[in-house]
């Protein structure tokens, strides 16, 4: 049964590509030196016996999955320190290769708890907590969401009441709905958490603030008095993580445990507030800013799997008696997979912009300049929501494009999907995030009407809406970008006009807003889509690579833009901006682009540079030996360890015997 070497179809695909995939890899990871370093770190992890010997997650129960994830991530944490890896992106590469399909039970410790201490704690608090965090004596998480409130954080019900006599805060869960519910790793792993609670001092509520709470004894790991906590049970995905619940029964913490870099409570209970607002929302902004890259990567993995498999999979003879076609040769299959592939590149580019913008803006915030905070909030919320919606939908398309095998965990795609889709909910539910974008856009529109200057990325709103598209038979990037700008401007104006009209006829601004939230989300979505398209074109145009690579990359970029127009056609033609002839040019361009991308499809996914050891997919293997791999996967199912299972004797046999007895002619009398 053994088959060796690279599958012939896949080998041919690589030979026929019109560009060198290594060039694109170099661009994606920001230069050949960084690619070498990435591969070096990944190989270190892949070769490490602790990671190598770990069992495949798919055959484990939840407790085993949790234990494996914990073991792997703790070993990775230690090795990262031993190896002196400090760059966040390098840590990410190492961790991803070490535990590709295990979500980290110390993930919140690293992605939210430590960064919040770094950004929101005083120098003294940092000196006290950070060394303990780095040595994992303190393992923490971010406990904000409650049973009754996740989105509306001003409505959180946990209280932190200051007692000036004892100089302590009393943390309480006043009712069932105030129980903390959902925080990652709160249930069993962590011994500290950052609690978001309503600050009450001198009898006044000052809104939500952050407090450091020790939840478990640092030696015995038992919950501390007054704290009830545990795991919330199995979920759609993230089986290996202990999202938790927590009830606080008047737990006292020292005054110094309030995060006091910006907001302070003095010993006598006087509340001191900083000049800026919403500074304690910054931890959410950090994660939102990172999610677009992260989700783009999830989709890139699904694309590698689906496209390599579609090159290997042959089904149906095109003409009677002829060879069965590679399913990737069907135009319909290309229409499923190439827009998904283009989306993953688009989101990786948007994620690159977003993270750089986050670093630039937060550096200004650190210096006390809060002027760009609204832009950072709007962009991070919008791109987080837009990218997670687009990518999770595309991952599901990839899964279905693999037919029956896509449904099996052997493909790897179901796991990618269940780990990616909560990105639509956590760090701000997507619709709610889009409404935050809409709020920002409405403000910009009002500023425009007042003749004020707009930030550069909404400047396009100043252009007239009375123009027609410049689209010609040769569909030009410039005309595509302008079409997206026009659509966004028009929908922003339509939503603003609808609200203004309602207000003019006597509705309150809140009522007018609430009666228009659907058009507002259309406007916000169109804005995000425009932003992603424009950014993608700009990054491709600026990319330093040879002509053939750039041409292959540009085809993807154009496909992303063209496909978006076709998917949302109504919004592009409603006011006659594009005419019938122009729509036909765009439709033809879509089909031409599918054909142009076809010979490069495998090279375009190879460029993502994912080793098999990370993908862990029978269908997405570099060598294309999918059938042998599927057979091996089936053979390794624990259900096959015994030829006849005990359940056969326990359940089938007795029922067979009972039915046999019931069906005897005598028994029926
Ligand atoms: C190949 C390439 C290689 C790539 C390499 C990749 C590298 C990748 C690197 C790193 C990857 C790391 C990824 C780690 C992943 C870890 C896995 C994730 C695990 C899951 C974690 C989940 C954690 C959580 O979910 S925590 C809980 C999150 N909760 C929320 O998000 C709650 C959502 N709700 C809110 O945010 C708010 O309530 C609200 C915004 C909806 C409303 O707030 P509000 O009521 O106070 O405000 P208003 O609506 O009244 O507005 C008032 C005013 O405030 C402004 N505002 C609101 N928020 C902000 C903000 N954040 N910043 C600034 N301003 C804000 C708002 O706009 C209003 O302004 P006005 O001027 O209009 O008045
Ligand atoms: C895997 C996972 C990990 C998580 N990790 C953490 C964590 O570590 N720490 C933590 O604190 N939390 C965590 N959460 C919780 C998460 O942040 C919340 O679930 C999220 O913020 C959404 O809030 P919610 O559940 O209250 O949804 P809801 O707000 O109840 O949403 C329900 C529906 O109501 C709609 N809706 C709500 N408000 C509005 C509005 N104003 N306008 C229009 N529509 C609205 C939403 O669009 C949605 O359709 C996690 C969640 C998941 C799934």
Image (tube, rainbow, N blue to C red):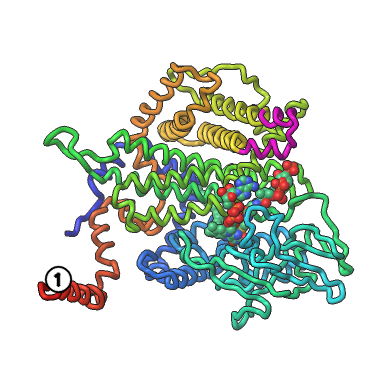
Reading the image, the residue beneath label 1 is 663
The majority secondary structure of the magenta stretch comes to: helix
Query: Residue at the location (67% across, 53% down)?
Result: 152
Taking the image as shown, residue 301 lies to the left or right of residue 125, namely left
Given residues 379 and 83, the one toward you in this image is: 379
Query: Residue at the location (85% across, 59% down)?
Result: 272
Does the stretch in magenta take in 618? no
Taking the image as shown, residue 582 lies to the left or right of residue 272, namely left
Stretch of the chain drawn in magenta: 498-517
Quadrant into which the N terminus falls: bottom left
Given residues 65 and 553, the one toward you in this image is: 65
Query: Residue at the location (46% across, 18% down)?
Result: 582
Q: Whereabouts is ligand 2, in terms of quadrant?
A: bottom right
Bin the neighbour count of mark 1 within 10 Å (Cα to Cα): few under 14, some 14-19, many 20 and up: few
- Label 1 C-beta lies within 8 Å of the nearest ligand 2 atom: no
Q: In which quarter of the image is residue 490?
A: top right
Q: Is mark 1 on a helix, strand or loop?
A: loop
Is any part of residue 356 visible from this angle? no
Query: Residue at the location (46% across, 40% down)?
Result: 343
Q: What percent of the width, then of the height, locates residue 536? A: 52, 35
Taking the image as shown, residue 645 lies to the left or right of residue 71, namely left
Is any part of residue 224 visible from this angle? yes
Q: In which quarter of the image is residue 132?
A: bottom right
Given residues 95 and 222, the one toward you in this image is: 222
Vertical comparison of 88 with 512: above or below: below
Q: What percent of the width, then of the height, locates residue 440? A: 69, 38
Q: How many marks?
A: 1
Taking the image as shown, residue 669 lies to the left or right of residue 495, namely left
In the image as oriented, which residue stretches furthest toward the front? 669
Q: What percent of the width, then of the height, locates residue 489? A: 62, 27
Does the stretch in magenta take in 512? yes
Quadrant into which the C terminus falls: bottom left
């Amino acid at each position: 049964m053994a088959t060796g070497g690279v599958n012939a179809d896949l080998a041919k695909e690589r030979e026929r590509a019109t560009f060198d995939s290594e060039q694109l890899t170099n661009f994606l990871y920001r230069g050949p030196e960084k690619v070498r370093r990435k591969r070096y770190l990944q190989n270190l992890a892949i070769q490490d016996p602790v990671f190598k010997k770990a069992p495949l997650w798919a055959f484990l129960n939840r407790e085993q999955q949790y234990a494996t994830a914990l073991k792997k991530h703790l070993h990775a944490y230690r090795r990262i320190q031993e190896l002196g890896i400090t760059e966040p992106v390098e840590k990410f590469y190492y961790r991803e290769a070490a535990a590709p399909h295990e979500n980290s039970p110390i993930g919140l410790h690293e992605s939210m708890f430590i960064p919040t201490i770094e950004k929101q704690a005083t120098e003294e608090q940092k000196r006290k907590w950070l060394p303990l965090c780095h040595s994992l004596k303190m393992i923490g998480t971010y406990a904000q969401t409650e049973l009754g409130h996740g989105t509306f954080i001003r409505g959180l019900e946990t209280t932190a009441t200051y007692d000036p006599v004892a100089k302590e805060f009393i943390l309480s869960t006043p009712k069932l709905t105030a129980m903390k519910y959902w925080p990652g790793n709160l249930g069993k792993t962590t011994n500290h958490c950052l609690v978001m609670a309503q600050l009450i001092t001198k009898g006044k509520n000052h809104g939500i603030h952050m407090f450091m709470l020790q939840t478990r004894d640092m030696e015995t790991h038992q919950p501390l008095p007054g704290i009830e906590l545990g795991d919330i049970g199995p979920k759609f995905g993230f089986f290996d993580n202990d999202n938790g619940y927590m009830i606080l029964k008047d737990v006292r913490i020292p005054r110094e445990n309030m995060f006091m870099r910006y907001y302070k409570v003095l010993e006598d209970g006087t509340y001191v507030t900083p000049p800026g607002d919403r500074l304690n929302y910054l931890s959410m902004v950090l994660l939102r800013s990172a999610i677009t890259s992260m989700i783009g990567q999830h989709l890139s993995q699904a694309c590698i799997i689906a496209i390599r498999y579609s090159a290997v999979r042959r089904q149906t003879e095109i003409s009677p008696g002829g060879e069965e076609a590679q399913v990737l040769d069907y135009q319909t299959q290309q229409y499923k997979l190439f827009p998904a592939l283009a989306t993953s590149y688009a989101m990786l580019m948007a994620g690159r912009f977003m993270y750089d913008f986050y670093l630039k803006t937060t550096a200004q915030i650190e210096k006390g300049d809060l002027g760009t905070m609204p832009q950072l909030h709007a962009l991070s919320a919008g791109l987080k929501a837009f990218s997670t919606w687009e990518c999770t939908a595309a991952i599901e398309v990839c899964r279905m494009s693999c037919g029956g095998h896509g449904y099996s965990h052997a493909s790897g795609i179901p796991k990618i999907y269940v780990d990616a889709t909560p990105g639509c909910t956590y760090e701000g539910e997507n619709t709610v995030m889009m409404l935050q974008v809409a709020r920002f856009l409405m403000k910009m529109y009002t500023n425009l009407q007042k003749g004020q200057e707009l930030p550069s990325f909404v400047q396009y709103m100043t252009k007239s809406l009375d123009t027609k598209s410049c689209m010609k038979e040769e569909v030009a990037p410039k005309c595509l970008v302008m079409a997206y700008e026009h659509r966004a401007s028009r929908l922003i104006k339509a939503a603003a006009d609808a609200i203004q009209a309602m207000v003019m006829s006597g509705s309150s601004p809140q009522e007018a807003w609430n009666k228009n939230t659907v058009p507002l989300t259309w406007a916000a979505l169109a804005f995000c889509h425009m932003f992603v398209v424009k950014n993608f074109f700009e990054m491709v145009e600026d990319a330093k690579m040879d002509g053939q690579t750039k041409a292959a990359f540009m085809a993807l970029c154009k496909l992303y833009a063209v496909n978006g127009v076709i998917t949302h056609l109504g919004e592009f033609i409603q006011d006659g901006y594009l005419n019938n002839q122009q729509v036909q040019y765009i439709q033809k361009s879509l089909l031409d682009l599918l054909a142009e991308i076809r010979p490069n499809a495998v090279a375009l996914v190879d460029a993502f540079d994912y080793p098999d050891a990370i993908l862990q997919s029978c269908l997405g293997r570099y060598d294309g030996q999918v059938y042998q791999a599927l057979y091996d996967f089936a053979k390794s199912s624990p259900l096959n360890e015994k030829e006849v299972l005990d359940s056969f004797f326990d359940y089938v046999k007795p029922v067979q015997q009972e039915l046999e007895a019931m069906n005897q002619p005598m028994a029926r009398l």
